[in-house]
Amino acid sequence: YSIDARSGPFHSATHWSDLGARAYFNLNAFPPGLVIHGVNRDDEGDYRCRVDFRLKPSRNARIRLNVVVPTSSVTISINNDTVSGIIGPFPVGRALDLTCTASGGHPLPTITWWNEGLLVDSFSEVVTEEATYNTLTLHHMRHSDLYRKFTCQAVNSNLTMPKAETVTLDLIFPLEEVSILERPGAMAEGQNYSILCEAKGSRPPAVITWWLDEIELTDTQQEVLFEASITHSILNLKPDKSDDGAILSCRAYNPLKNDTIIEDNTNVTVHYPPDVTLQLAEDCSIISIQENDSIAFECLTEAKPNAYSTTWFINDKQVEPNLSSGILIQNHTLQLHKVSRDSSGLYTCKAANTQGNTTSNAININVKYAPVCGLHKKYVYYGGQKEAFNITCNVEAHPAPTLFKWALNTSLGINYIAETRFLNGHSQSTILYTTHSPEDFGSLLCWAENEVGQQIDPCRFTVAASVVPEPVHNCTFGHSPTVIGGVMVDCQVGWGGGLDQTYSVEVTLDEQVLAKLVDHKDAHFSITGLKPGSKYKLSVVSHNAKGSSVPNIINMDMPVGLAEKHTSSEHGESNDILFASPILGMLVGIAGAIIICLTILVAIHLWNDVKRCKHHSNRRDYDKDDMEVRSFDGGSLISQEISGSDIIILKADQHSSKENEHIYQFIRAQDNVYVEPRTLITKNLVGTLERKDRMAIIISKSPRSSMGGHQSPIHSIGNPHIYNTLTSSCQSHRNSVSSSSSSPPPGRGSPDRESTGRYSPASSVSSNPRISSLFASRRGSSSTIIHQPDCYMPNTAGDSITTPLVMPSNEITL
């Protein structure tokens, strides 16, 4: 570059540059100087400045220009392969050479290796005009080198920024240990189990697989713990019995080093319920089993643990060993000796262990046997001559019968019937049998035959002539407790003569038929509209197609007292007799039966109490010759013309005073009682003590009187002191009654001989304080009812007077 100012001022001097426009001389700078733009490597060198003067010698100055060229690039390579960022992974324990190359640069750069700010290598092994090299060698990488950062830095001047490149190490950790942590032990078939396997040390995370006898299992879940150094795998296993004894393996390997596999094994134990198979013994044939043959069954069982019991069944009913019946059970074998047709059925066996029980397959045994007579709905057929009967003979046999025979067995012998007269079906034969003469009545015999043999005992059917039915018997009856003039009749039916029978009842009053019910389906009747105080006769008859039975006659006295007791002002008199509907009769009958049952139960209870009071008394005599059958109902005495009742009545004349005292004390000890002494019945006394929670029956009989054989009043039941008091009271009024009136008051009877057994009142002794005190109630309340006794005297001289009866304070019925 030159400036020529010889021809004029300096600012107008001529400039010449060999560098072109990149260079110019800056006259404004101080000191002025040469400015070069875009300096490059070629601009480096020695620069000389020469100034020529007009009058003085020239002057020269020399200066060196050093041009610094930054390093163009820095790279890191492994075995000539450039790497950057995270490098690897590299197995732990191996050596690694990292080469850093700095390309270009003037002057040549200096290369250094740094780790986390620490200089680890500053020696450049190779220096050329093109590049500078520095290799860092890691001789034995350890676990601690994981994610370690190494930086290569190139510097050639402090005028420029250093060039650098960093890499991070990634390492491969080897798999150290594999173990099954939760070994299941014995597993139950069909249950779900979770089994855990752990792999330690592997990086990247280990790959875990499960194997069961070299069969890979895929139902697993995997998770990584503690920064990939521990891997868990969970196997979901549902074992069956085929898995028992297999080897379960947990295998793990590092996916980057799959040449090394570590595994842990465990034996699989599966418990399962028995697998049961039933079969016949080798020498048995299911097809040819007949009666008296022997059969043997084998129950084959596969179970873990072993079955602890084996049970045998026929038609779901357990079979028990029975030597007398030929049933022998030994281990897993069932032996049946001398089988019969009852041995037929479905045989199964059931084995049980701790895992459950299993029933085997069923084997159907059909024992072949000769025909035997089956069940029949009818064995006896009744009819007349020239009457046809369809008779079916059912037999049981295996196999089914192939032949039937019929015969008639009469007093003249056995006559076989032609096959054309009967029709054979499956296990049955039907004959159309007609009786043409008396000789055709008798026993029909039926035989069957199959491949086993002929029926030994034939089926027997009797063909007999039908007759009229037997009469009804054991008729029981009673007055309705709710309907005035109502009565219920219940009879036991007899043999119907071989035919269906119906029943009729006829109501008669004074030899005049008032009503009649026919074609009744049973012998139970409910009748209403009977007039109180009247004597009726009921006639019950059985009927069938052959005729009618002998009538069963029932005589009834409709009670007056009961009618008066239940009749209200709104009911008028009626002579109509109604046969109630069967439903109403049934309901009334049920109610009456319940009342009768309760009466009997309480009577038994009280009678036992009385017997306990008589424990030390003498033996009692019974007079069955004097017994008369009586039906006690609402105050009337009803007699039947049917014998057979069996009532034994205790003789009252043998009661001792001590016993009377015990009886009276027992009755008086009950709560809520009063005295009703105004009723007197001769002959048999049938009295009912009724109460809501207590009921008793007192039956007494007095000895015969010396006057005309008539019965005297009953002996006293109660305290002898009461008896003496009443006797003296009545005796004191006897003369006054006789003198004041020659006829009894209305309603009390008459003194003539024809009214024997009826008694006339004397006078009331209601003011007698001794009697009042004797019959005072234990309750002591003002509501206690005390009836003072009237005095009843017989029309015949010499009869004793009666004592009152102690009755409950609610309704009393005699």
Image (cartoon, rainbow, N blue to C red):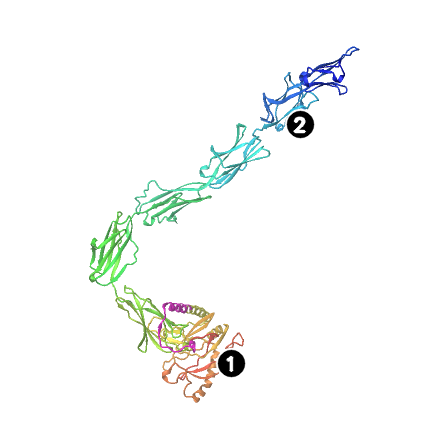
Residue beneath disc 2 = 116
- Residue at 70% x, 22% y is 159
Give the position of the N terminus as an image quadrant. top right
Dividing the picture into quadrants, the one containing residue 534 is bottom left
Q: Position of residue 9 (x, y in %)?
A: 76, 16
In magenta, the rendered stretch is 565-594
Q: Nearer the viewer, residue 288 or 147?
A: 147
At mark 1, the secondary structure is helix
Q: Is residue 397 left or right of residue 438?
A: right
Q: Is residue 346 left or right of residue 691?
A: left
At mark 2, the secondary structure is loop
- The stretch drawn in magenta includes residue 588: yes
> Could you say which disc has been placed on residue 397 in the image?
none
Q: Position of residue 347 (x, y in %)?
A: 36, 46
Visible in this render: residue 787?
A: yes
Residue beneath disc 1 = 770
Verify CB contact (< 8 Å) between mark 1 and mark 2: no
Categorize mark 2 by other alpha carbons within 10 Å: few (<14), some (14-19), many (20+).
Answer: few
In the rendered view, would you say 502 is above or below 296? below
Dividing the picture into quadrants, the one containing residue 151 is top right
Q: Nearer the viewer, residue 160 or 117?
A: 160
Give the position of the C terminus as an image quadrant. bottom left
What residue type is disc 2 on? Glu
Q: Position of residue 129 (x, y in %)?
A: 64, 16
